[in-house]
Amino acid sequence: MTWVLIVHEVADYTTWKAVFDDAAARRRAAGERAFQVLRAEHEPNSVVHFSEWVSLDDARRFFHSPELEAIRAQAGVRAPQFLYLEEVDRGRLG
């Protein structure tokens, strides 16, 4: 499995979420297979997007495309930080 963790500030969570939801078909077509969205407890505009991808190359190509840069600007994203990850272990406790 390959994963991408993105941490970023947004100008307004509700605006960002609407644009994020609108881009679901684009993300799926680019290779995203699953996602989670998390927010900081006391900072609702601090967003984490954690997603599973077909490949890290597909993810990099999508996240660094001019099309997505325009979408991020529309969504009010500030200074996204990307971490590209490969799964090496998984378990469930309990």
Image (tube, rainbow, N blue to C red):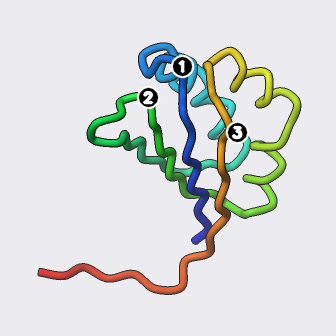
Q: Which amino acid type corresponds to the residue marked 2 in the rendered image? A: Asn
User: Is residue 64 depicted above or below 76 in this figure?
Assistant: below
Q: Nearer the viewer, residue 74 or 32?
A: 74
Q: Secondary structure at mark 2?
A: strand
The earlier-in-sequence mark between 1 and 3 is 1
Q: Residue at x 52, y 21 (%)?
A: 16
In contact (CB < 8 Å): disc 2 and disc 1: yes
Q: Which mark is residue 29?
A: 3
For disc 1, the marked residue is 11
- In the figure, is residue 9 to the left or right of 31? left
Q: Sequence order check: which comes first, mark 2 or mark 1? A: 1
Is 48 left or right of 54, judged from the image as shown?
Answer: left
Mark 3, other Cα within 10 Å: few <14 / some 14–19 / many ≥20: few
Q: Amino acid at mark 1?
A: Ala
Q: Left or right? Give the position of 16 relative to 83.
A: left
In the figure, 66 relative to 22: above or below?
A: below
Label 3 vs label 2, nearer the camera: 2
Q: Residue at x 73, y 63 (%)?
A: 56
